[in-house]
């Protein structure tokens, strides 16, 4: 080896660390475990390969509640990440965290990124915008409830997938008569059987436009529609038309095993059902009460969005903005949507998925998108913006469980849940004046 070659190698070796150090590291705390967590790592790796200025580092921080709690504690200790994934019920909490968040619309503008909120599905972004329509966080994994059904069991009872709750009543009784143990079960009872029930029928879940107008909102889900629906479900529970299977998605086992013929669950549950169900299944829209409304509105979303946190150097925010632009690319979004079952957040990603023939090859996967985009959201179907909402959902779970067990009627349970929940809302209002 001559001296010139040796010198060149020495210089290159010296420059390598400098090149590596030049890339700004962006820390992204998320709550995606399992295969979705692996996909998150893949998305970050692909972004890192696409450019050399920034390195996005995903960090799994536990479930949604744990991740949000960790981020708040980290901010107080001045050790916050650049990006944190927060579930939809934490939106009001994040908005009220003055000085802690960098609104996405402002971040993208300040960073000079090409950003138009109109490119995103309004039914998705509506949950994460302020009263002026500005996007505060970047939608990432959004889903909405649909109805899954066991084709074999429905054929056995000679029934069609119910489009309305009236049809569910009839179908459930026929299934029972045909020897099926349970007509249907549900995941996420507050989200599906109260929050989405209200939105789909254009009925307020809370005052102040479901909390979007101010922190003075009071819960209103103890109205005639909600009481009627929960009362009917209580009757169905006694008859076996409905079986309660637990909070979150614990009831999935009842559907996988064939114990229950139908299952109201998140559209993001599709991949789990495809993996665990040993029978042919279909997907249809969430039923509505035909006696209450001629045409149902859109359902509202669940899932989470990405929030940029304050207190970082400016070069970090340029990297965050670049990463958000990357996430919004049709190819990236379509791939995430098709892999996870979460909704595409942009019209371009939806159109790309259609053109790729994904919905034709995977029947039912388009149902949630059609359900979400079939109309213009109203103040009652835009979403919910309520403080301490995670704790309010716990209260709703407790009160509904007392209905399913026959300890109290629907009206008493919903009145109690509203009263207890309003106490939490007043605490939130007082803390955020």
Image: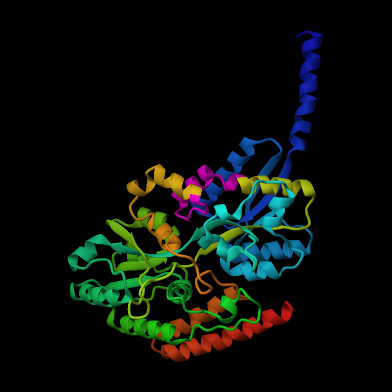
Is the stretch drawn in magenta largely helix, strand or loop? helix
Residue 194: where, in percent of width, then height?
46, 77
Q: Is residue 313 visible?
A: yes
Residue at the far top in the pictured view: 2
Q: Quadrant of residue 369?
A: bottom left
- Check the image and report above or below for 270 versus 292: above
Image-based side of 365 in relation to 320, left or right? left
Image-based side of 168 in relation to 417, left or right? left
Q: Is residue 329 magenta?
A: yes
Q: Quadrant of residue 281?
A: bottom left
- Check the image and report above or below for 260 versus 418: above
Q: Quadrant of residue 19?
A: top right
Total count of labels = 0
Span colored in magenta: 326-347
Residue 15: where, in percent of width, then height?
78, 27
Which corner quadrant holds the N terminus? Answer: top right
Residue 112: where, in percent of width, then height?
71, 46
Residue drawn at (71%, 38%) of the image: 53
Q: Is residue 208 magenta?
A: no
Check the image and tell me how it is coloured.
rainbow
Q: Is residue 404 visible?
A: no
Image-based side of 198 in relation to 256, left or right? right
Residue drawn at (61%, 81%) of the image: 217
Residue drawn at (69%, 80%) of the image: 429
Which corner quadrant holds the C terminus? Answer: bottom right
Residue drawn at (37%, 49%) of the image: 359
Residue 192: where, in percent of width, then height?
44, 72
Image-based side of 301 in relation to 61, left or right? left
């Amino acid at each position: 080896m001559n001296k010139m070659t040796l010198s060149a190698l020495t210089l290159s070796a010296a420059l390598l660390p400098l090149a590596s150090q030049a890339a700004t590291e962006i820390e992204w705390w998320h709550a995606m475990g399992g295969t979705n967590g692996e996909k998150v790592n893949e998305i970050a790796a692909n972004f890192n390969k696409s450019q050399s200025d920034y390195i996005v580092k995903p960090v799994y921080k536990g479930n949604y509640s744990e991740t949000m709690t960790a981020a708040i504690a980290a901010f107080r200790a001045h050790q916050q990440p650049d990006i944190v994934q927060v579930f939809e019920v934490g939106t009001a909490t994040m908005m009220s965290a003055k000085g802690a968040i960098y609104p996405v619309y402002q971040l993208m503008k300040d960073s000079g990124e090409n950003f138009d909120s109109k490119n995103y599905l309004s039914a998705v972004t509506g949950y994460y915008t302020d009263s002026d329509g500005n996007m505060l966080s970047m939608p990432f994994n959004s889903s909405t409830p649909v109805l899954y059904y066991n084709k074999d069991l429905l054929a056995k009872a000679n029934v069609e997938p119910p489009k309305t709750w009236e049809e569910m009543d009839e179908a459930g009784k026929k299934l029972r008569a045909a020897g099926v143990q349970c007509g249907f079960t549900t995941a996420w009872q507050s989200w599906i059987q109260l929050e989405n029930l209200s939105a789909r029928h254009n009925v307020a879940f809370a005052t102040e436009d479901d909390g979007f107008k101010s922190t003075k909102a009071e819960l209103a889900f103890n109205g005639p529609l909600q009481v009627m629906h929960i009362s009917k479900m209580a009757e169905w529970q006694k008859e076996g038309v409905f079986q309660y299977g637990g909070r979150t998605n614990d009831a999935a086992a009842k559907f996988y095993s064939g114990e229950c013929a139908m299952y109201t669950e998140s559209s993001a549950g599709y991949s789990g059902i495809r993996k665990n169900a040993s029978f042919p299944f279909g997907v249809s829209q969430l039923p509505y009460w035909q006696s209450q409304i001629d045409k149902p509105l859109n359902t509202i979303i669940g899932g989470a969005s990405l929030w940029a946190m304050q207190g970082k150097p400016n070069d970090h925010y340029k990297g965050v903005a670049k990463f958000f632009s990357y996430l919004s690319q049709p190819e990236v979004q379509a791939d995430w949507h098709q892999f996870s079952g979460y909704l595409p957040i942009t019209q371009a990603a939806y159109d790309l998925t259609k053109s790729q023939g994904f919905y034709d090859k995977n029947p039912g996967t388009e149902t949630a998108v059609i359900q979400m985009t079939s109309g213009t959201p109203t103040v009652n179907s835009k979403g919910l913006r309520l403080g301490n909402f995670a704790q309010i959902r716990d209260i709703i779970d407790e009160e509904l469980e007392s209905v399913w067990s026959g300890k109290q009627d629907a009206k008493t349970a919903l009145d109690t849940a509203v009263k207890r929940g309003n106490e939490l809302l007043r605490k939130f209002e007082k803390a955020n004046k």
